[in-house]
Image: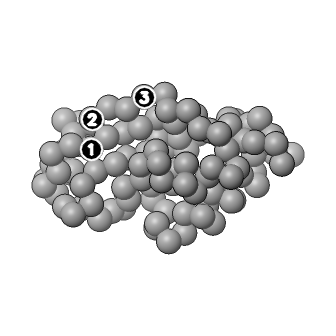
Amino acid sequence: AKFTMAWDRAAFVAIHPESRDKYAKALADQMAPGGKVLMCTMSYDTSKMDGPPFCLTPQQVADHCGQYFSMEKLDSRDIIEFTPEFREAGLTEVFEDTLLLTRLPQ
């Protein structure tokens, strides 16, 4: 059976950018048509930090997942005040985006 709901809290941002297409396909393969994935991603200045967690913008999610999922951006907020490790790396802002992906019909 395929999943109708999933929560990706820190998986996609942990995947090396070169493997993102494989992850997107693997995620899609596990989801039923119409299945929902709540996904949290992070975006930041990559000249100051490389990851993991790797920078993953909503546009990058759309680029990798768009053939499998529709996407709605639910929220975006700067979380730098809650993440001292990012401040120590020299970042001045880190945006956490909350996305809702819906599996397209296969």
| CA distance separating discs 1 and 3 | 13 Å
Q: Which residue is mark 1?
A: 94
| CA distance separating discs 1 and 2 | 5 Å
**First of labels 1, 3 by sequence position:** 3
Which element type, helix, strand or loop, lies under badge 2? strand
How far from the left and from the top, in percent, is residue 35?
Answer: 74, 37
How far from the left and from the top, in percent, is residue 17?
Answer: 46, 66
Q: Which residue is mark 2?
A: 78
Which picture quadrant has residue 75? top left
Tags 1 and 2 touching, CB below 8 Å? yes
**First of labels 1, 2 by sequence position:** 2
Is any part of residue 54 visible from this angle? yes
Tags 1 and 3 touching, CB below 8 Å? no
| CA distance separating discs 3 and 2 | 10 Å
Q: Which residue is mark 3?
A: 75
Q: Residue at x 13, y 55 (%)?
A: 90
Q: Residue at x 37, y 32 (%)?
A: 76
How far from the left and from the top, in percent, is residue 31?
Answer: 75, 45
* Residue 68 tag number: none
32 up-or-down from 27: above or below: above
How was this image coloured?
one colour
The crowd level at tag 1 (other Cα within 10 Å; few <14, some 14-19, many 20+) is many
Q: Residue at x 16, y 57 (%)?
A: 89
For badge 2, the amino acid type reads Asp
For badge 3, the amino acid type reads Asp
Q: Residue at x 57, y 57 (%)?
A: 64
Which picture quadrant has residue 84? top left
